[in-house]
Amino acid sequence: MNREQNQLTTERAEFIENTKQWVTLDTQLKIINEKTKKIRDMKKALTEKICDYKEKHPIHNTIKLSDGELRFYEKKEQTPLSFAYIEHCLEQILTDEAQIDFVMNYIRDNREVNIVTDIKRVYNDK
């Protein structure tokens, strides 16, 4: 084998090993993400129950814990900025339908697009 063939063989072996490691990590992440989702759902349900209790019963906004405290607070959550919302807002301030269509098309057509190469795992049907 010449030097060039040796390098190709080494690069191919490294590619195969990297691919195996990627699949292993992807599998581990899938398991972790499934567990994380279950924990997040359980925590959300408990948060709702705890906050419902607090609304019905006057308790302090702070609960002491061994390693800190829990604080009850109110927060504002804004809805995502969607095309439908933008169009609705434009309809509130502009009367010319052509202007609204022009602005909406401009926004849609001029959004920044980044193209990157990535890997997506597709599972076989069971």
Image (cartoon, rainbow, N blue to C red):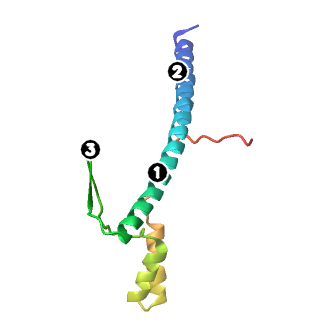
Residue hosting label 1: 40
Q: Residue at 48% of width from left, 45% of height from top?
A: 36
Q: Residue at 57% of width from left, 42% of height from top?
A: 120
> Looking at the image, can residue 48 be seen?
yes
Residue hosting label 2: 14
Compare marks 1 and 2 and give the one earlier in the sequence: 2
Closest to the camera, between mark 3 and mark 2, is 3
The amino acid type, in three-letter code, at marker 3 is: Ser
Q: Is residue 56 left or right of residue 34?
A: left
Closest to the camera, between mark 1 and mark 3, is 3
Q: Is residue 63 left or right of residue 89?
A: left
| Towards the viewer: 13 or 78 | 78
> Looking at the image, can residue 117 be seen?
no
Residue hosting label 3: 66
Q: Residue at 48% of width from left, 86% of height from top?
A: 98
Categorize mark 1 by other alpha carbons within 10 Å: few (<14), some (14-19), many (20+): few
Q: State which quadrant residue 24 falls in.
A: top right
